[in-house]
Image: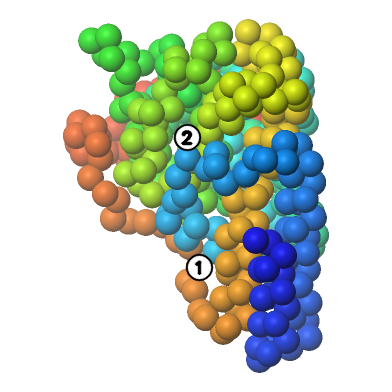
Amino acid sequence: KFIILAAWLVTLTAHAQLNDEENQQLKTIFFESRKVISEVMKEFPIDEKLVDFVTHSGARTDFQLQKVYQKCISAETETITIGAVGGSITTGVKLGNEFAYPSILADYIKNMCPRVKLKVVNASQNATGSLTTGLCLDSYFNGEEIDIFLVDFTLNDGIKYKYSGKQDNSPYELLIRNAMTHGFISQPAIFGIYFWGNGFKRNYTTQKKHSEILTNYNIAAISMNDMVWRFINRKVIMYDTKVKIVIDGHHPNKSIHKLTAGMVSMYIARIFLKYAIEDAKNIKHEDGGLFQNLPAPINKNLERFDFEADRSFRCEMSSLPSRI
């Protein structure tokens, strides 16, 4: 598929009304993307397709990636900032922040976009759920302009938020709505990441409930939970047992963090390729901005919540992340 796209892109850029510098920008982004994809593919059995684990694509995520793409191909030196929230999985517990998937994703994007500077603001905290994060999002990032926003609370929310014995996804929806309206200077490209549940249990996870939220807001999501359990069930040698996936009860090892970053980078590369082809055809697309009109919330009580007015929660009383 990517070989076909390569031939197509070369043909388009050869005939499009682009100057030499613009042509080179398109070729650079395309071939750097292929390099990343090839590297990621080495981690997978030959019969697996990365796209199988994109739980759902997201039109809003794709729209916001337009401004990231423009930074990527800009002749000026731009900065792409990756923000991340979650629990101990996202902090890279027992490994170090440099081995956590947000930091690895920055390395992949740097390969795709060699001219830009990359910055990672990892605001995840051990044992934290989406409610505290959602209420304190602006405090966590302190005015940082975030371009790509990674969100994972599948494990911690599964432990923390139940109502009448059922999983409650209203804290997660509050976080997503804040990220799309008041949490940042401009709305980032949001990605939901789904891991497994406590004790590495496949079904003890909030993936289904969180997926309801992200689908409602047209946000992309990637399931590492589905990926690793397919590997286990098919007895793929690299990942056929729990000990080859986690370093303790449920925290992923370096290889899984790398695969997580690879999944997100492949999604981004595919969207960048789409925009590169549109550029070659002189198809104009708008830069992403803030979506002012959100769809109605799944949890109706959030219709009455005002992020500006409802400031009774004292974020300084909670443990603020180190923002590594």
Horizontal side, residue 221 vs residue 218: left or right: right
Residue 188: percent from the left, percent from the top?
51, 51
Which corner quadrant of the image does residue 144 belong to? top right
**Residue 80 in sight here:** yes
Residue type for callout 1: Asp
Q: Tell me which residue sits at (77%, 31%) in the image.
A: 98
Q: Which residue is mark 2?
A: 137
In the rendered image, which quarter contains the N terminus?
bottom right
Q: With respect to residue 195, does 293 lie above or below?
A: below
Position of residue 139 in the picture relative to residue 30 (left or right): left
- Residue depth check, mark 2 versus mark 1: number of the one nearer the observer: 1
Q: CA distance from mark 2 to mark 1?
A: 24 Å
Query: Where, by quadrant of the figure, is residue 117 drawn?
Result: bottom right
Q: Position of residue 135 (x, y in %)?
A: 40, 30
Neighbours of disc 1 within 10 Å: few (<14), some (14-19), many (20+): few
Q: Give the labeled residue for mark 1.
A: 287
Depth check, front residue: 212 or 143: 212
Residue sitting at 47 percent across and 49 percent down? 57
Q: Is residue 163 left or right of residue 241?
A: left
Q: Reading the chain from its start, which is encountered first: label 2 or label 1? A: 2
Residue 196 higher or lower than 103, as above or below: above
